[in-house]
Amino acid sequence: MMLSIVKYAMRRFKKKANWRDIADVRYGFEQIGRRFDKVNKACRYEFFQIERMKAEWIIPVDNRDTNKVLLYFHGGGYAAGSISTHRAQVSQMVMLSGIKALVIEYRLAPEHKYPAPVEDAVLAYDWLLANNYSPEHIAFGGDSAGGGLTVATLLYLRDHNKPLPKCAICLSPWLDLTLSGESQTTKELLEPMLVKEAFPLWVSNYLGDADAKSTYASPIFAELSGLPPIYIQVGSDELLLSDSTRFAEKAKAAGSPVTLEIYEGYFHVFQAFFRVLKKAREANKKLAAFLVQQLGP
């Protein structure tokens, strides 16, 4: 019953969304974020900057493993989103895992085009390494475009002979900017959140003249060997379902350990609705358990 109510509410909101106006999308995203951005008493928050980039530590109050960290990249189509829009969701993973997180605000399109977010993600990772965090104690994570950025950054590090983090988690990752996945068509009527017509514009805003099949823009087309363990969660009813299923199949064939979990009847980044959806709470617990398993209890 609650899942149906949430989907109904999202469809009503989607009809009103002015997705052609990036400024309006950003404002709406921030307003929604503020509504649910409650400070979690189980965490403490430390805002700072990494060179030009805003960043925030989200730290468990009882933080015993100070050397372990989840580096998290927010979603928002590479054009919207911030620390504040994702603070509540990341706080859940911090609270459930006991592992602190570093959330960054990478540069956004159309002001900053590809590969600016990849450059900023690498900058944040290099900052962690320079501050004595070991790769085996670092996990990457991200949702939607942030999930795509997670995989793109892993590929960049691999290709440039940099040490890879221990593992990664991806929530409904956007991995194909050519929009060639079959779910772009087959899931159009089922998708309660994402607007299919918006994708070509947002791709253009981000890529500019770059090739949509570029490795760090659309990891689905990359050679996928040599990646660390990746855990992907995706809903069965979302436009981006094929991004996850094709990536998992191709990565496994290349010898990279990928675990894919499809949540039947669920939608894009449903984990953020943990306050009202039991399945979202269960999914977040699984994400946290994966982080603990990989980084150590």
Image (tube, grey):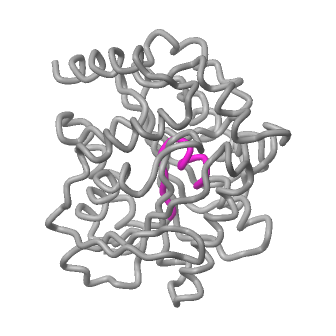
Image position of 17 (left or right of 288): right
Image quarter (top left, top right, bottom left or bottom right) of the C terminus: bottom left
Image position of 180 (left or right of 291): right
Q: How many labels does the image show?
A: 0
Q: Picture coordinates of residue 86 (x, y %)?
A: 37, 51
Magenta stretch: give its range: 140-150
Q: Which is more toward the observer, 84 or 70?
A: 84
Tell me the quarter of the picture where residue 196 sits.
Answer: top right
Image position of 111 (left or right of 99): right
Q: In this view, does 227 lie above or below 199?
A: below
Q: Which is more toward the observer, 3 or 51?
A: 51
Q: Is residue 182 above or below residue 149?
A: above
Q: What residue do we see at 64% from left, 40% from top?
A: 175
Q: Picture coordinates of residue 25 (x, y %)?
A: 48, 34
Image quarter (top left, top right, bottom left or bottom right) of the N terminus: top left
Q: Picture coordinates of residue 231 (x, y %)?
A: 48, 50
Q: Picture coordinates of residue 295 (x, y %)?
A: 42, 72
Q: In this view, does 43 lie above or below 107?
A: below
Q: What residue do we see at 23% from left, 45% from top?
A: 36
Q: What residue do we see at 59% from left, 72% from top?
A: 52
Q: Which is more toward the observer, 25 or 165?
A: 25
Q: What residue do we see at 74% from left, 54% from top?
A: 115
Image position of 135 (left or right of 12): right
Q: Which is more toward the observer, 227 or 113?
A: 113
